């Protein structure tokens, strides 16, 4: 009994096999790869119509890709809440996880996997949060070896609406 008290909470949380695609493990492998290469990024940032470009080499990849990790749908309370659909294309599998449950902020996750290598090529995530104070819509896209994109809209009741877009591409230093 005392042995179980010494386990890391994340180990206990994920003691069972993952029910859906393991997005955090995939993103963590990408973070390790990008960090070890010292990968540079070029970002096209747009917020409420104002644009600018940023090129950086000192990227904290954990912070940068945190929204993808937060989009993990393998929470025990969400088990069975997502409908899974797989499309078998010539060179790829496209797996879609979708929920209509209004309590779950992650609405849709689409994973594209190469048939030959079994490697994830693309990830798309749609998130939505809504309550009486605000509504937030986010779309996240990650393409292995190329870059990622985040688009969103935030509406705060009677105060403001804001839209943003971050299109990032991996570049050589």
Image: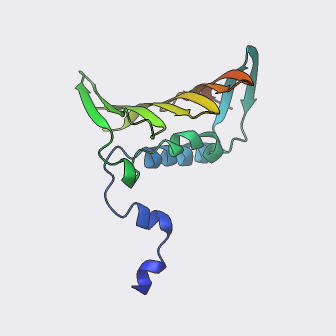
Q: Is residue 83 above or below residue 29?
A: above
Residue 116 visible in the shown view = no
Give left or right: position of 81 versus 150: left
Picture quadrant of residue 159:
top right
| In the displayed structure image, the side of residue 125 where residue 111 appears, left or right | left
Give the residue at x 56% y 27%.
137
| Rendered residue at 65%/33% (across/down) | 133
* Towards the viewer: 98 or 15: 98
The total of numbered circles placed on residues is: 0
Across and down, in percent, residue 36 comes to: 59, 48
Which quarter of the rendering shows the C terminus? top right
Position of 27 with respect to 73 (left or right) is: right
Image location (x, y in percent) of residue 168? 62, 26
The image quadrant that residue 1 belongs to is bottom left
Residue 53, position in %: x, y?
Answer: 74, 21
Determine the residue located farthest toward the bottom in the rendered image.
2
Residue 66 image offset from top left, x and y in percent: 58, 43
Residue 69 appears anywhere in the view: yes
Residue 161 versus residue 170: which sits nearer the camera?
161
């Amino acid at each position: 009994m005392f042995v179980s008290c010494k386990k890391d909470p994340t180990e206990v949380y994920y003691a069972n096999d993952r029910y859906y695609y393991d997005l955090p493990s995939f993103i963590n492998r990408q973070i390790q790869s990008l960090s070890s290469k010292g990968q540079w990024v070029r970002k096209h940032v747009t917020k409420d119509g104002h644009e600018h470009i940023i090129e950086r080499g000192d990227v904290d990849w954990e912070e940068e890709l945190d929204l993808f990790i937060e989009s993990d749908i393998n929470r025990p309370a969400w088990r069975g809440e997502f409908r899974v659909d797989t499309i078998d294309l010539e060179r790829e599998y496209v797996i879609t996880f979708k929920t209509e449950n209004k309590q779950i902020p992650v609405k849709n996750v689409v994973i594209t996997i190469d048939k030959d290598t079994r490697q994830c090529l693309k990830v798309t995530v749609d998130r939505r949060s809504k309550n009486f104070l605000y509504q937030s819509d986010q779309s996240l896209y990650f393409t292995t070896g190329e870059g990622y994109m985040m688009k969103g809209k935030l509406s705060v009741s009677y105060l403001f609406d804001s839209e943003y877009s971050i299109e990032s591409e991996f570049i050589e230093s």
